[in-house]
Amino acid sequence: MAPIIRVEHLRKVYRVGHEKVIALNDVNLSIEAGEICCIVGPSGSGKSTLLNQLAGLEKPTKGHVYIGKHDISSMTENELAKFRQEHLGFIFQSYNLLPSLTAAENVALPLMFKGIARKERLQLAVQELKKMGLGKRANHRPTEMSGGQQQRVGIARAFVAKPKVIFADEPTGNLDSQTTKQVLYRMLNMAKENGITFVMVTHERDLSCVADRIITIKDGMVESNVVLDEQIKAKAKAEMFKDILEQESPAEPKTTMPAYSTKK
């Protein structure tokens, strides 16, 4: 399996007054196509800066970021904007929904940029909302929904265009523990079902145990880049999503036949 994301000698320096702050220092890594990847690290470690670099939201001071065969760090702003529309999806901690639009209209936005007709894109948006358990909320506006429901709308919006890569920055940071599990479960399933590479920044290391790869950032450098064993992942998912899996498991089939008979 070839890497879909490749980073070579990445360095990012910010100027704060007369000072230079090194946010990333000679970062090298790769992420395979279709992987669920978690970027973890303490506050201020550089993990969100790394995500912004991978997504082309910020330019590096030095080094290169490749997505597929494309060196996005060398693209112009217009080229980057077009590339993101065609190949990338985003999930934000703050939801970033437009309050004047319905859930379906918010989800349909990425399809508008692809030139898909309004009727078709709204149909596709409703289908995606149904996968997130929000089919009945399609015509509701963000102010009429809970935080967890708004985040699921944001997830549906990221997935509707079936991008190659989805970047998520602390997507469950504003949610309670139970809603976090539900949202994470849906994100992981949809990514796997569609063969989408999913890169998530989180400060909650417990959440990272269900990923395929964990990249730990410390002081702007890669401290470790670990691919998890399949058995370890399966056990972690079974424990984390136990309640959800029990609810989704099929009920025992009913029968009118006796369990045994005494007739001869």
Image (cartoon, rainbow, N blue to C red):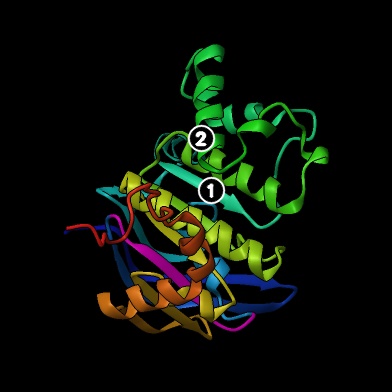
SS for callout 2: helix
Q: Position of residue 35 (x, y in %)?
A: 32, 61
Other residues around mark 2 within 10 Å, as few (<14) / some (14–19) / many (≥20): many
Q: Quadrant of the C terminus?
A: bottom left
Residue 219 is left or right of residue 33, and the answer is: right
Residue 221 drawn in magenta: no
Percent across and percent down for residue 249 are: 42, 57
Compared to residue 166, the image places residue 217 above or below, namely below
Q: Residues within 10 Å of mark 1 (few under 14, many from 20)?
A: many
Of residues 222 and 141, the one nearer the viewer is 141
Residue occupying image coordinates x 83% and y 40%: 143
- Please tell me which residue is depicted at 75% across the width and 31% down the height of the picture: 140
| Three-letter amino acid code at the position of disc 2 | Glu
Query: Which amino acid is tagged 1?
Result: Phe
Hey, which residue is sitting farthest front in the picture?
A: 264
Q: Which residue is mark 1?
A: 90
Q: Is 42 in the magenta?
A: yes
Q: Residue at horizontal 57%, vertical 51%? A: 91
| Image coords of residue 13 (percent x, y) | 56, 72
Image location (x, y in percent) of residue 242: 48, 70
Label 1 residue SS = strand
Highlighted range, magenta: 34-43
Q: Is residue 188 left or right of residue 33?
A: right
Is 75 displayed left or right of 100 in the figure?
left
Contact flag, marks 2 and 1 (Cβ < 8 Å): no
Q: Quadrant of the N terminus?
A: bottom left
* As drawn, 103 above or below 12: above
Q: Quadrant of residue 9?
A: bottom left
For disc 2, the marked residue is: 128
